[in-house]
Image (tube, rainbow, N blue to C red):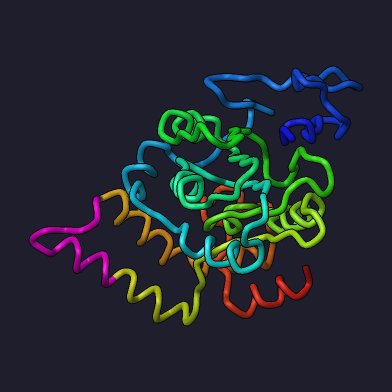
Amino acid sequence: MNILENILCVNCKNKCNNDLKCLKCGYHYKNINNVIISNLNINTMLDVEKYCLERGDEDPSERFIIFINHFLKNKKMDILELASGPGNLTKNLLNKLNNIENYISSDISPEFLYYQSKNVNNNNINYNLIQFDANNIPFNNETFDVVLGSSCLHHFLYYENTLKECYRILKPGGLAIFTEPIRTGNAVLNLMLNMMVEIDILSINPKWNKNLHTRIKAFANGANKILNIERQDRSKLTEYEDKYQFSLEKLKKLSKSI
């Protein structure tokens, strides 16, 4: 089955035809550079070139493969990846998992998906790139066996909505897998991160570039500010790339509530 048969209109949530045109309101998805676009007016705060320069060699796929093989080994799977960025995880899962039926790679940024379309290829799997907001996943109920995302929930202003959407679109017995950075001991961690950056700057052969130095220091020094804003008015977090800094205890509670 082509998974695109289950795509819904992002405006009225009604079914689309084979040309991805809504049968009710007439909304029509665009196809630009092999990427299906829901809305060109939404985008990411990240700079694609800088992001790929800093994190182009990341491969978090092993963590996901362990869970997938444990729960769904030898089962043909329809997979949705949220916030796939340049496609580091996408590329490795497509190459390492043998039982994928359909793979949807999604992101809020058209630019990230355009980059991915040039750098990730797989001729044996129904692999599609779709741009949409993860708070509004345009697929029918019970469409996917797996929904996954690598270090993305803390970027979503209303991450609870995203997780509810994941529950809705998962088939019975389906699996949602997210990895997130964890903060423990904020004061000590902030000090250590700043020290690491300063030591790297002073070293003969720095391991990180200037952009990454700036990002790490901003992350460390903005931690308490972000936590205070979250308590007062969540909407003010829109100006931050990293909107949340989860503790292990908070993620445990969130998982139980879901």
Q: Position of residue 87 (x, y in %)?
A: 47, 42
Query: In the picture, which quadrant includes the N terminus?
Result: top right
Above or below residue 80? Residue 4 is: above
Residue closest to the eye, 73 or 93 = 73
Residue 190 lies in the magenta-colored region: no
Left or right relative to 248: residue 212: left
Q: Quadrant of residue 215?
A: bottom left
In front: 200, or 23?
Answer: 23
Residue at 70% of width from left, 61% of height from top? 175
Q: How far across and down, in percent of the image, does residue 218 sit? A: 40, 59
Q: Residue at x 52, y 50 (%)?
A: 241
| Residue farthest along the left direction in this orientation | 204
Quadrant of the snapshot with the C terminus = bottom right
In this picture, residue 94 sits left or right of residue 53:
right
Name the residue nearer the viewer: 117 or 78.
Answer: 78
Instruction: Find out whether residue 207 is within the magenta segment.
Output: yes
Q: Is 195 placed left or right of 59 in the picture?
A: left
* Residue depicted at x 60% and y 33%: 128
The image shows residue 234, relative to residue 39, as above or below, that is below
Magenta highlight range: 195-209
- Residue at the far right in the pictured view: 24
Which residue appears at 63% of the width and 52% of the height? 156
Relative image position of residue 191 (x, y in whole percent):
34, 76
Front one among 247 and 167: 167
Instruction: Reply above or below: 229 against 192.
Output: above
> Number of callouts in the render?
0
- Provide residue 150's location: percent of width, then percent of height: 53, 56
Q: Residue furthest front?
A: 74
Rendered view: 219 above or below 133: below
